Image (tube, rainbow, N blue to C red):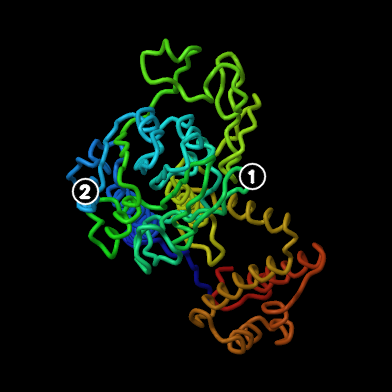
Amino acid sequence: MTVTVRPPVPDPSARLAGRSATAKKRSWRWLRLVLPIAIALLILAASAIAYSFQQPDQADPGYLSPVGTGSTGGSRLADALRAKGVNIQRVTKTSDALVAADAGDVTLLLPAPGFSHPFYLRMLKLLPSSVSVVLVDPSQRTLANGLQPLDIDERHLSAHLAALDCRLDGVPAGTAAEVQRAVYSDVDPETGVEIDRCYGGGLVTYVLGQAQVTVVGAADPFRNDRIGEHANQAFAAGLLSVKKKVVWLDLHHSEPRPGYVDDPALASGTPAPPSLGPGSPDPDFPIPGSDEPTIANPHFGGGGDGGGGSPPNPLFQAFPPWLFATAALLAVGMVLLALARARRLGVPVPEPLPVLVRSTETVEGRGRLYQRAKARPQTLRALQAVARDRLARLLDLGANPDRTVLVDAVAAQSGWPREDVDRTLYQGDPEKDEDLVRAALLLETLTHPTPHDTIEGDPR
């Protein structure tokens, strides 16, 4: 008795359910991909915004101004200096500050030295020896263009607290202050003489020409909102009260390049310093019609050679450190996104075909792939698996029957020796195409017997 077996008709509802489940998984996968990157970008943006709000704006007219009463102003420091008997002269131009300091026996305070033209900073070496200059948190670019004989070795995102570890005039021993945002290198001995190095390198004092210059690595001890923390007031007021007069430069915009006159007596303003006179041999200042001096070596601030070569591009000094951190985090995020979107190694995920493809084309295409890869053993394993499934259905043995049960049932129905059935359905490792064809013919004969060798339940 023969029974005709038709392939099962696919259930449309099951197919729709499979598609919806796949779509749901796909949406969750998209969420898992985007969510970590979105959280990282959100944290990065929040950090950048908080950092920008935390940093004071030096262009604000009240920033470290002796009359500025805001959080970043310097009115509390000015009051503390007046209480010590110090006279404060407020000026709004660097040229006026240099002229006032040239009288001697004063402290010249530059709270925002980056706004002063670099040529004015180069003129600090022309001041007399009785002048003390204080530069508050100068950037590396300011130090280099101003030909100052030191560099910034480290720069932190915020000022660190440090204790006084040297003898500093006017500042009590052991005074702890938040001055260590920038850590300075050694002074270049060819252009300056280092006198003191305090607060772990956050404060350096050196002689430039004749004047004594002190660079402070943070503005926090001078600000109204930070001067009351720790011993910031004792540090700032002590540092600036060594002289009985402070020339306080209240500057909040970039200055133009200093002018030049042949005859100082004809100038409408204050006469220019001697180094700007005609025929000056000083290479730090250009004479009209001559080449610009070269910007200082970024490793050490001093030593312009006066040549006409193009200055080096201080790329790492032109941008804030957080910009490079942002670029690095974005690069890491792009790499992780690329890895997540790339092909994963693992079990293939079944998905419904977007179009209907003829079964013969699918079989031929898959066969060509196996042939191109010379995957003969894998091909035989696939054919044997299909043959075992077909025979199990025909013999009503259920899905995935035991090997012994299937071999015994097929041998009993086909009349083949049990060893031949086991070898045909489970064994074989073809090395040539001929071996694979021979094994495939045996499977074809076993699963599709001739009328003289019919398996019970086969439609033939």
Is residue 15 visible from the viewing direction of this image?
no
State the quadrant of the C terminus.
bottom right
Mark 2 is surrounded, within 10 Å at the Cα level, by few (under 14), some (14 to 19) or many (20 or more) other residues, namely: some
Residue 458: x, y in percent? 56, 72
Q: CA gap, disc 1 to disc 2?
A: 38 Å
Residue 392: x, y in percent? 54, 78
- In the image, residue 456 sits, relative to residue 460, either above or below, namely below
Q: Which amino acid does label 2 sit on?
A: Arg
For the residue labelled by badge 1, is the local secondary structure a helix, a strand or a loop? loop
Is residue 290 visible from the viewing direction of this image?
yes
Foreground residue, 164 or 342? 164
Residue at numbered disc 2: 82
Residue at numbered disc 1: 190
- Residue at the top extreme of this rendering: 266
For the residue labelled by badge 2, is the local secondary structure a helix, a strand or a loop? helix
The image's mark for residue 307 is none
Foreground residue, 224 or 8? 224
Q: Quadrant of residue 290?
A: top right
Q: Looking at the image, tell me whether mark 1 or mark 2 is earlier in sequence order.
A: 2
The residue sitting at 66% across, 81% down in the picture is 414
The residue sitting at 27% across, 44% down in the picture is 64
Mark 1 is surrounded, within 10 Å at the Cα level, by few (under 14), some (14 to 19) or many (20 or more) other residues, namely: few
Foreground residue, 331 or 374? 331
Disc 1 or disc 2, which is closer to the eye?
2
Residue 210: x, y in percent? 51, 41
Q: What residue type is labelled 1?
A: Glu
Left or right of 457: which side holds 408?
A: right
